[in-house]
Amino acid sequence: MIRGITLRRPPISPAVVVLLGLMAIGFVVAMIRYANGIGAISNLNDSTGWGLWISFDLLCGVALASGAFITASMVYLFGQERYRSVLRPAILTGFLGYLMVIVALLVDLGRPERIWYLIIFWNYHSVMFEVGWCVMLYTFVLALEFSPLVFERFGLEAPRRLIHALIIPLAIAGATLSTLHQSSLGSLYTILPDQLNKIWYTPLLPLMFWLTAVAVGPAMVIVESSISSRVFRRGLELDILGGLARVIPFVLAAYAAVKIGDLAGSGELDLLTKWNLASGLWWLEMIGFVLLPMVLFSLSAVRRSSTWLLFSALLVVSEVVLSRFAVSLINLSRPEFAVRYWPHPLEFAITISVISAGVLAYGLVARYLPLFGEHATEPAGK
Amino acid sequence: MAKVAILFDAFRCTGCRGCQVACKQWNDLPAEVTHNTGSYQNPPRVSANTWLLMEFREVDDGDGGGRWAFRRYACMHCVHPACVSACPVGALHKTEEGPVLYHSDRCIGCRYCMIACPFDVPTFQWNKGLFEGPVIKKCTFCSDRLSAGLDPACVHTCPTGALKFGERDELIATAEARIREHPERYVDHVYGKEEAGGTSLLYIGPVPFTELGMPQLGPEPIQEKTEGIMTKATPAVLVGMLVGLSGIYWVVKRRQEMMGKNRG
């Protein structure tokens, strides 16, 4: 007998299928890498030891995850309670961001099974040593800051209270560790005064990397909120995001001042008048991705418009991507016999796959854990 | 202990590449598949299977013609190596005698040494998978031969005496003497005496070194820039942030409590 025909929605949405497919492709590519070496899936070579994975997955990934420590500092240390509703999504974005960095490293490192060697072998003169340790410790801090979502979901009151009691030291540790490694990712390139183009090389690279990370933190919170409000059909808290946006112009102004002052101080301003790739990128970054968002974010009309907020935030994100690529890849000179590097399609496959995994994980957390609207001090199981 | 060095005299070098072959033979390195790039220089750069390479360049001989300029391309065994400073796990280390050696059992394959080296020397085994354990490869100064009282394979083979092995100070004196005796043969500069704090590979020759593809380096060791950051700036930022953030938290909390009291 026909009881009735029920139209069933597919249990898994098409978007999830696509994301899972991209992850599967990346997994297969990673297996090829483990079987046949990095050379089998990349165009990296002895003249270009670091490529897409370092410039994007590592440098941009770490910078774009800075919303976590910025928001945590504002809420827990500077007493800005009104940002609490964007805190958990910011922590999640940061936590997933760092996990994605580690996954990308497991592909890029020559000996990923030895990634833990940093714990037992120390060369404390190496900037890479500091980067590795701070990333390790900070990922642990992020995990602890993320854990209350899990504890609340499963009604584990005691661990949740423990984390809550530790939250101030965790926020201080998180901001300190973040400052240390956001800046030391810039310090990595201070060992290259002769290889890095004069316009882009400066001993102040660590300060510049830190300033841009601080600027892009609130911008990423805006981007993440805009996307998730559309995907999960939640309201966009425009006044909160507008408040966050107010910080950005000051940080961008400081960054612009450091950039211009540095070139002026070393007498290199005239290099900007010669037209080449390095100077062109400098001008593009300064005008399109620093001055423009600085002006936009200072206008209250922009801060009240969700579209303009998102656009301006994406400009800041673009600034971070451009500057990281400019310093780490584009403006590094190569020996005369070197083959020009362009990422292999399989390098893109890995990067896209890692991003897909992060997006999928974010969606899973949003669906199954109390990501939105839960107050940290509200009792579990509400 | 006396520091060892090698003097490369580009005037005496004939580009025979016996050194290149001797290095391969002593270290059991396989041949590489390459293709003709129109030069006698082959392979095009040092790699995990070619630790020493003679580079061929054609330079203007001042009479409207060309002449060969040969350059030895291999690890310079710097006095203050950037690679040693850069390696996070200390897999590269500078011995007292001079050679910069590499411990493959520590290497995690991060390749920062490749980025840091101003001479583009360390190379990586790109074609080895997870279980084959890819590592960084470079010239070892034949430290195994040195400990047996022999000279490096490249020096031993050189038929014209373009390569000379000895103590660094003595070789610098020898190089300067040669320049003084025959100023028409040599550019008045011993490359490696002071570059980046000095290297164990000393070069003299008839062609300006920038035309040989040698980087123009100042006398400060390269890692002084980053080690200043690590030893001074990092602890300062660490302490400053911990103290500063704690202070801000305390001040903000006090203000909130005072405002709460006033409202009450």
Image (tube, coloured by chain):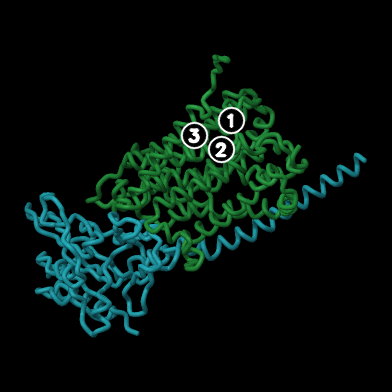
Which residue is the extreme one toward the right? B264
**Residue sitting nearer the eye, A83 or A278:** A83
Residue A269, position in %: x, y? Answer: 43, 43
Q: Secondary structure at mark 1?
A: helix
Residue A95, position in %: x, y? Answer: 57, 46
Which mark is first along the chain, 1 or 3? 1
Query: Can you identify the residue that label 2 sits on?
Result: A362
Q: Colour of chain B?
A: cyan
Q: Nearer the viewer, mark 1 or mark 2?
A: 2
Q: Residue at x 31, y 46 (%)?
A: A41
Q: Nearer the viewer, mark 3 or mark 1?
A: 1
Which mark is first along the chain, 2 or 3? 3
Q: Colour of chain A?
A: green
Up-down relation of residue A268 to residue B180 (above or below): above
| Amino acid tagged 3 | Phe
**Residue sitting nearer the eye, A16 or A194:** A16
Q: Which disc, if any, is residue A289?
A: 3
Q: Secondary structure at mark 3?
A: helix
Query: Can you identify the residue that label 1 sits on?
Result: A228
Quadrant into which the C terminus of chain A falls: top right
**Residue sitting nearer the eye, A200 or A51:** A51
Residue A73: tell me if it is visible: no
